[in-house]
Image (spheres, rainbow, N blue to C red):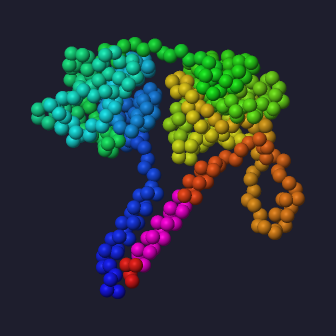
Amino acid sequence: MANAPPLTTALTLCLSLLLLLLFSTTTVSAHNITRILAKHPQFSTFNHYLTVTHLAAEINRRETITVLALDNAAMASLLSKQLSVYTLRNVLSLHVLVDYFGAKKLHQITDGSELTATMFQATGAAPGTSGYVNITDLKGGKVAFGAEDGNGGKLDALYVKSLEEVPYNISVLQISQPLNSVEAEAPTAAPTLNVTAILAKQGCKAFSDLLTASGASTTYEQSVDGGLTVFCPTDPVLNTFMPKYKNLTAAHKVSLLLYHGVPVYQSLQTLKSSNGVMNTLATDGAEKYDFTVQNDGEVVTLETKVVTAKITGTVKDEEPLVVYKIDKVLQPTELFKAAAPVKAPAPKGSKADDSSEADGPAADAPADDSADSTADDDANGVSRMAGGRLVLGLFSFCVGFFFL
């Protein structure tokens, strides 16, 4: 026992291993500007328009970002200019810096002034240096911001306070008023959106061809100006489903295709936060033709009672149109028989087990639909369980060692 390490050394080593293992099994979540601003009601208007202009999604995708937030009063002055949503996007993107500036860094700017690029510059729509913002550390502890116009620009706004900082990931800082930029406020035309052409170029050509052949494309094109969300089965998925499609009447084919469109713009963030029943282009007074949106973390599914389809990617997201890829054709209960409830397996050797084998597979089970869970999901679940058991075991060992 003379060679045994001291109790404190062994205990420290044990706890260090426990902490290391605990952090290695913990997933670090990316930032979410919508949730950050939701904690500050006085920035609700700014938060709303980040979503409307799709800047929120762009901000969340970037690893290093600084958002110059405007409170409701400052946003009211900006909205009084009655800019189109496309022009407003340019103006707000000028308030998103593609570098990290915490409150401390603002007062440590080399030579007291610095030009930094914004998301407006990143769009390629900003001429010259108009997509840059000048940050200047003034006397008396004040920091000013101004849009660059090639002649130094005017310092329009002052730093007010820090709302949230996660070095060096995201910083959300309040400034006193909007940054003025003639270039950012220049009228921006609405993009031309051809639904079938967009689908055909993005892995959904088979679905696009069916829309055109059936005449359902007319309804899609007429709906896009008011807002449209399209859930598109990819070409391999639709090709597998074609035998069922060919058995439908002409009217039912149109209904099935319209069932994949929702007459309102639904961003991915909205789908994640607004689960529930959703009407479609096929919905009318007589028949529902709806499905249920559900999410499990970042995974969004569409449940029709016949199949459950998963959103696998975004084809186009430019308000008023958003198009998502899905891994199954959506089958409404108005046209297809609902899947039978899945029963728990009976114990081996029981009468129920023997009868189920004798009866064979359930007649209602869809023959051509894959299971909803994936191998990756199963592997991740097993990994999390194993990690949890290992942490618990090591913790028990440390506690037992302490009381020896």
Question: Which quadrant is the C terminus positioned in?
Answer: bottom left
Seen in the picture, residue 248 relative to 167 is either above or below; the reply is above
Instruction: Label the magenta part by its dominant secondary structure.
Output: helix
Seen in the picture, residue 161 relative to 135 is either above or below; the reply is below
Give the side of residue 221 with respect to residue 360, left or right. left
Q: Is residue 386 magenta?
A: yes
User: What residue is shown at x 30% (from left), y 79% (from top)?
Assistant: 6
Residue 269 image point, x, y percent: 50, 37
Give the side of residue 166 with respect to residue 282, left or right. left
User: What residue is shown at x 45% (from left), y 70% (from top)?
Assistant: 394
Q: Is residue 320 magenta?
A: no
Residue 98 image point, x, y percent: 34, 32
Quick one: 253 or 212, which is closer to the camera? 212
The tally of labels here is 0
Residue 235 image point, x, y percent: 68, 30
Give the side of residue 330 with respect to residue 318, left or right. right
Quick one: 119 or 185, which is closer to the camera? 119
Query: Which residue, as the protein is rendered here, is positioned at the far front?
Result: 3
- Residue 268 in view, yes or no: yes
The magenta region covers 384-400
User: What residue is shown at x 37% (from left), y 31% (from top)?
Assistant: 46
Question: Which quadrant is the N terminus positioned in?
Answer: bottom left
Seen in the picture, residue 384 relative to 270 is either above or below; the reply is below
Quadrant in which residue 289 is drawn: top right
